[in-house]
Image (spheres, coloured by chain):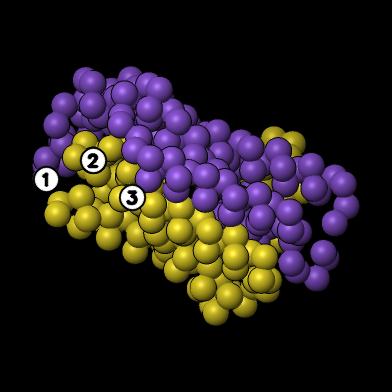
């Protein structure tokens, strides 16, 4: 794999991870504080979508979606999925710090296991096609 | 119970969306031109692709279910628990997309899945 593609892959993986974790945090913050309760009525979803924090979360998640689509145009799904799973670790940290959630020992153990898996996969080549 | 039902919807729609998206983006090929004109051209080409439209619809279903889920469960549960789709997707990436998944990726994906299971306890 050439250095240009390696750096491009790492940069897009970082954008995918950050936009997803921060997007989920903003979305959850908005849904818990100010967007009102969601019911079966589509109107409650519409009202929530246009509240400020939920809107910001959606913008970040759109950035996540687009950057992930770009990444998938040259890197395998079986590489993209585990590597971007680092976002789960980041989300657990942000949930504890900003949402005051109780993250148990089992959840932290799971976090470390995910990190180990991410590092293992990250040591491999992100492209397994003909150009690899 | 409501949380697990919402989670099942999220996992099923995410798996479908990821497979459709990856299949269509691979058909398109690597994106190399990141100038505005190049990106406009990419979006024009991709906008009418049926698989991508279906993928976006599946992602919308997954997103609304996720919105409902974070109101009834912790975010530190909802996000990792939704990664239950990863194991299914790795298997399907091999079987449906015919990607080469080496032993290191299998082990890595298994560790991630084990971690997700622990996070969900």
Q: Position of residue A62 (x, y in %)?
A: 48, 38
Task: Tell me the colour chain B is drawn in.
Answer: yellow
Against B44, is A56 above or below? Answer: above
Q: How many labels were placed on the picture? A: 3
* Direction from residue B92 to residue A51 in the image, left or right: left
Of residues B109 and A38, the one nearer the viewer is: B109
Q: Earlier in the sequence, mark 2 or mark 3?
A: 2
Q: Residue furthest right?
A: A2
Label 2 element class: loop
* Residue matched to label 3: B120
Q: Quadrant of residue B55?
A: bottom left
At label 1, counting other C-alpha atoms closer than 10 Å, the crowd grade (few under 14, some 14-19, many 20 or more) is few
Place residue B117 in its image quadrant: bottom left
For discs 2 and 3, the disc positioned in front in the rendered view: 3
User: What is the secondary structure assignment of the residue under circle 3?
Assistant: loop
Residue occupied by mark 2: B73
Q: Are marks 3 and 1 on the same chain?
A: no
Asked whether residue A2 is in view, the answer is yes
Chain holding disc 2: B
Residue located 21% across and 20% down the image: A34
The Cα atoms of the two marked residues, 2 and 3, are separated by 11 Å
Q: Chain of mark 3?
A: B
Q: Which mark is residue B108?
A: none
For the residue pair B99 and B17, the one nearer the viewer reads as B99
* The hue in which chain A appears in the rendered picture of the protein: purple
Residue where numbered disc 1 is placed: A40
> Which residue corresponds to the image point at 34% horizontal and 64% vertical from the top-left?
B12
């Amino acid at each position: 794999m050439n250095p240009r593609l390696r750096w491009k892959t790492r940069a897009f993986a970082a954008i995918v991870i950050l936009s997803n974790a921060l997007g989920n945090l903003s979305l959850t913050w908005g849904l818990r504080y100010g967007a009102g309760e969601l019911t079966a009525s589509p109107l409650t979803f519409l009202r929530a979508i246009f509240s400020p924090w939920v809107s910001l979360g959606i913008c970040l998640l759109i950035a996540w979606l687009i950057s992930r689509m770009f990444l998938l145009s040259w890197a395998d799904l079986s590489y993209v999925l585990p590597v971007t799973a680092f976002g789960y670790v980041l989300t657990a940290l942000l949930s504890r710090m900003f949402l005051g959630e109780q993250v148990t020992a089992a959840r932290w153990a799971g976090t470390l296991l995910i990190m180990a898996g991410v590092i293992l996969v990250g040591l491999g080549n992100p492209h397994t096609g003909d150009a690899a | 119970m409501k949380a697990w039902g919402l989670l099942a919807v999220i996992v099923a729609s995410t798996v479908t969306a990821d497979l459709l998206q990856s299949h269509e983006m691979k058909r398109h090929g690597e994106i190399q031109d990141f100038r505005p004109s190049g990106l406009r051209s990419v979006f024009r080409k991709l906008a009418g692709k049926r698989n991508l439209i279906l993928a976006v619809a599946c992602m919308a279903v997954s997103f609304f279910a996720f919105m409902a889920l974070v109101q009834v469960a912790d975010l530190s549960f909802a996000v990792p628990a939704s990664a239950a789709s990863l194991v299914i997707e790795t298997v399907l990436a091999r079987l449906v997309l015919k990607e080469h998944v080496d032993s290191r990726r299998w082990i890595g994906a298994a560790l991630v899945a084990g971690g997700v299971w622990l996070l969900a306890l």
